[in-house]
Amino acid sequence: MLGIIIGVASLIAMVSVGAGAQARVSEQIQSLGTNLLIVISNSNNIRGVRGGGGTRATLTEDDAYAIQHEITAVQAAAPTLAATLQIVNSNLNWGVTVTGITPEWLEVKEWNLAEGRPLTAEDHRTAAKVALLGQTAAGRIFGDDNPIGAVIRIKRVPFTVVGVLEAKGQDTSGRDQDDIVMVPLSTGRRKLFGRVPGQARAVWVLTVKVREGEDLYEAEGQIRELLRQRHRLPQNEDDDFTVRIPSETVNVQEEASRVMTYLLASIASVSLLIGGIGIMNIMLVSVTERTREIGLRMAVGARSRDILMQFLVEAVTLSVIGGLIGIAVGLGGSHAISYFAEWRTLVAPDTILVSFGVAAATGTVFGLYPAHKAAQLNPIEALRFE
């Protein structure tokens, strides 16, 4: 029973740790926004001389508009400009990423407001000096005070806080997504970021949300083709932009997490195997020690199948009781790991059912041979056994 208890408990604990890791990765995918494509400016290319990344913003707001309205697979496209700037409130200041956005950005990122209102098309059209704060940025310069309606300064320009975003947490690279301030793109271009190398409406990044059910890679190809046409790039010339699928990185991590779960489950299964072998050995010893008892039972009328069933039931009973105790120990161990190691664990009902089923099957499989051996004993030789 001890082998079965250890095997089932370790199986539940290990699989719950792996499932918790997978759930965390899935949350990271959701925090990035589902079905996203990121289009990034590359560099300028003059007579074959490539200036390197960041030398020219090759994308524009008009590119985002074209992607959103000419590609049916795209739900929305949001252009952005960003810079790390100091924000000031009274005697408090904080260095933060200030991002110029259009109204589509919150829809694309699936980012809701905790309070206040979003930035509107009117704010963008009039270059209004209004701002949204992430949870971290709001906490750094306002503490526990309500920032809605307060005025902050960015590069000595006053901005009225109109909303606070819900917490997003860290992204896959460990960056705090809540350490951010958002302003209308037109305002940021005129008041904060200065001249961007490129056209008057140039931006560094386009974030594209693909409609639910549409293929990301097909949409990527359509976006690439449209931008090459708009940028008038010859066939033999490289793209002056890069299209990335953020979920690819997270999917790799998710696959690695899934492999780790299988590895942990395999290790636990070895424990169950060892427990089964232990049951078989104990039952074989039991057959030897109870040879006279078996002979006596056969002498008074017990058939071979009665002896087989007796020892098989004993083996299965040991496994089932061990499995139940192992489930209790495994659940307790999972909660202990979650509490003391502060590691998220997730125990699924099917894991418990599979563990219990494997324990019962182990007793049946490994108890079958000793039971069969006992059933095949000769009654006369069994009675003579010392």
Image (cartoon, rainbow, N blue to C red):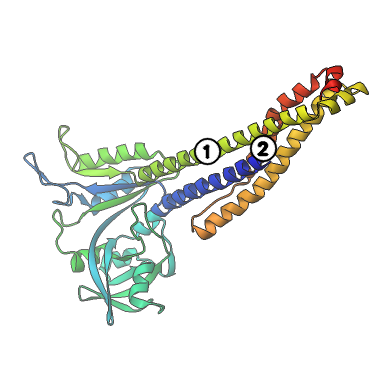
Counting other residues with Cα less than 10 Å from the Cα at mark 1, is it few (<14), some (14-19), or many (20 or more)?
some
Q: Please report the residue visible at 20 percent of the width from the left and 73 percent of the height from the top.
A: 155
Q: Please report the residue visible at 21 percent of the width from the left and 44 percent of the height from the top.
A: 241
Locate residue 296 relative to residue 46 in the image: left or right: right
| Residue 135 image point, x, y percent | 39, 68
Q: What is the quadrant of the C terminus in the image? A: top right
Which is more N-terminal, label 2 or label 1? 1
Q: From what the image shows, is residue 290 above or below residue 24?
A: above
Q: Callout 2, which amino acid? A: Ala
Callout 2 secondary element: helix
| Residue 143 image point, x, y percent | 38, 77
The residue wearing badge 2 is 359
Callout 1 secondary element: helix
Q: Nearer the viewer, residue 219 or 36?
A: 36
Q: From what the image shows, is residue 329 above or below residue 342?
A: above
In the image, farthest residue toward the left:
47
The residue wearing badge 1 is 267
* Quarter of the view holding residue 265: top right
In the image, farthest residue toward the front:
386
Q: What is the quadrant of the N terminus in the image? A: top right
Locate residue 266 relative to residue 297 in the image: left or right: left
